[in-house]
Amino acid sequence: MLLTVNAMEHTLEAETVVAALSTVRPEAIHTHWVEVEGVRYPVKQALEAVLGVDRAGFTSHAARRQFRRLGFATSGNGSSDAAIRQARPDRTSPATPAQAAEAFAALVTFLREKSLTTRVADLEHRLVGAEPEQASKLGRGEGLTEQLLHAALTVRRDVGRVSDVIHAAVIVLALPAILEPGETIANRPSLGPGNDKTRPFDLETDRRVAEFKVALWSGGDMMRKRGVVADLVHLSLDDSGRRPELWVAGEAPLHFLRTSRSTVEELLSRAPRRLRERYTERFGTQEIPLRTFVREQAAHVHLRDLAKVFPEIG
């Protein structure tokens, strides 16, 4: 779809929006929003992030109109806030109705006890400086337990989008297993959806930077492939001297990264423009197979399997 902003023409597609916003943390919503992959963003922030243009150059009304044309739900268009989008199951053997009901009850209890946004923000601050045992206690204290993760995974397989809970729980529960003795969290972690300029990575310690991709691959995963490649490039560009790690769920994404003949150019084509520019400045041509990039330019990025920490997630 073509649109003109600030006298410049842009091509905008739904997949581009999803990919561009996958690494963006939503700002506070004051009036108008757009919902993308179950996450709501202020419409002007979203369009600015997708197009790479200053939000002062367009109105909220114009931004909402563009997102509606692409099929996204926005404020003020009569869509129901309570609408539930059925997600495809991640497993071929779903939980029984009784198991699903029990898992859903546990998840609803957790979500109603306290605002998830508040809970996650508080925990992010308290995790700074934490060592493995303390990180584990802090996570349990906020209810991010293995039982909650199991319940959230069960619900996601059958009925809904609980990716935010799973993302936060996986990172917090993984900390005791992946942090080394004496290693400390150096910056507020990004447990919620997306990152921001002050928190460019999901996890930063005094020894490593890491991104976590928790989604299970089940075929037709082009958007997930683009997202994992964008995170890989982002990590490969870090020059802090800390160990970069990309954590993914299961063998499918690892196999893709190590064997894909698709070019980096193709897989980054819908990533944020600044990320593509930084890639070119550092590595030059994008017309190389992904597997070559993984083996050579990104060889210093450690690829990790979350299923080794949580077997049920793979």
Image (spheres, rainbow, N blue to C red):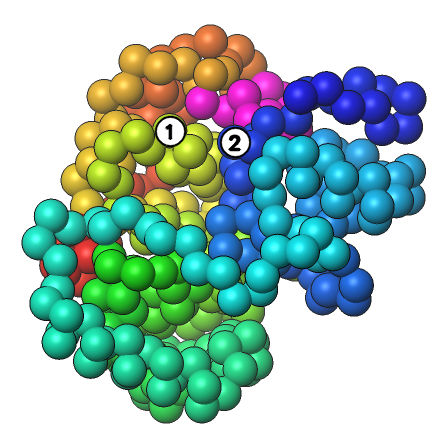
Is residue 121 shown in magenta?
no
Please report the residue visible at 67 percent of the width from the left and 34 percent of the height from the top. 69
Residue 64: x %, y % from top left:
75, 44
Q: Amino acid at mark 2?
A: Glu
Residue 287 versus residue 195 in the image, above or below:
above
Mark with earlier residue (1, 2): 2
Is residue 274 shown in magenta?
yes
Q: Secondary structure at mark 1?
A: helix
Q: Which mark is residue 15?
A: 2
Please report the residue visible at 36 percent of the width from the left and 53 percent of the height from the top. 86
Residue 1: x %, y % from top left:
67, 21
Please report the residue visible at 26 percent of the width from the left and 40 percent of the height from the top. 217
Q: Which residue is disc 1 drawn over?
A: 222
**Which one is in front, 2 or 293?**
2
Residue 165 sits in quarter: bottom left
Residue extending furthest toward the front: 78
Residue 42 versus residue 168 in the image, above or below:
above
Instruction: Answer with left or right where residue 46 lies relative to residue 208.
Output: right
Q: Amino acid at mark 1?
A: Met
Instruction: Answer with left or right where residue 25 lies relative to residue 144.
Output: right
Residue 280: x %, y % from top left:
59, 19
Q: Residues within 10 Å of mark 2 (few under 14, many from 20)?
A: few
Q: Residues within 10 Å of mark 1 (few under 14, many from 20)?
A: few
Q: Which residues are magenta?
A: 267-281
Alpha carbon separation for disc pair 1 and 2: 9 Å
Residue 74: x %, y % from top left:
67, 51
Instruction: Answer with left or right where residue 221 lies relative to residue 122.
Output: left
Q: Which mark is residue 101?
A: none
Q: Secondary structure at mark 2?
A: helix
Q: Do labels 1 and 2 touch, CB within 8 Å?
A: yes
